[in-house]
Amino acid sequence: MQEGKRQKQVAGLINEELNDIFRRMGLSMIDGGMVSISGVRITPDLYEARVYLSMFQVKDSHDVLLRINEKNKDIRRELGTRVRHQLRSIPELQFFIDDTLDYVDKIEALFKKIKEEGQ
């Protein structure tokens, strides 16, 4: 199903604010690696936001995800103070690892292998 205009607006607002919150809380640089928000998808009722995290040179991405989930209440509270005049309710945040880059690398490796075998 296609996202509505309001969903896109709220997702954009949450994405922008979470990026700033992550920088201020020191969550954008963990274990010598970099964590960024690659996207936010929000449910049609605007009560739940799925935040996709892209991790670069992070040793254990699941450990980083655990750390971020431990700070979920603090992150949501900070988000609430920033957007309280724009949203009626602050959505519940769910964090996921965005493995799109890993998938792209895997596909490129397969294409390279096929190309080498064809020659």
Image (tube, rainbow, N blue to C red):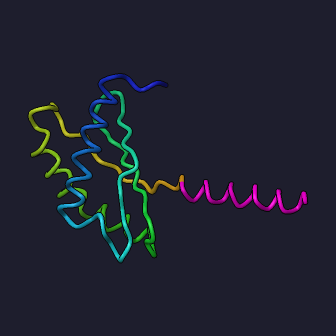
Q: Is residue 35 above or below residue 42?
A: below
Residue 118 among magenta residues: yes
Residue 97 horizontal/vertical position (percent) = 45, 57
Residue 115 location, quadrant: bottom right
In front here: 25 or 1?
A: 25
In front here: 33 or 73?
A: 33
In the image, farthest residue toward the right = 119
Residue 88 horizontal/vertical position (percent) = 15, 31
Q: Is residue 31 above or below residue 64?
A: below
Residue 84 location, quadrant: top left
User: Chief secondary structure of the magenta span?
Assistant: helix
Residue at the image point whose x is 17% and y is 47% from the top = 79
Q: Is residue 55 above or below residue 15?
A: below
In front here: 28 or 1?
A: 28
Residue at the image point whose x is 27% and y is 65% from the top = 27
How many discs mark residues in the rendered view?
Answer: 0
The quarter of the picture where the C terminus appears is bottom right
Residue 18 horizontal/vertical position (percent) = 25, 50
Q: Is residue 113 above or below residue 37?
A: below
Residue 9 among magenta residues: no
Residue at the image point whose x is 60% and y is 55% from the top = 103
Residue at the image point whose x is 28% and y is 35% from the top = 47
Residue 116 location, quadrant: bottom right
In front here: 54 or 43?
A: 54
User: Magenta span covers which residues?
Assistant: 101-119
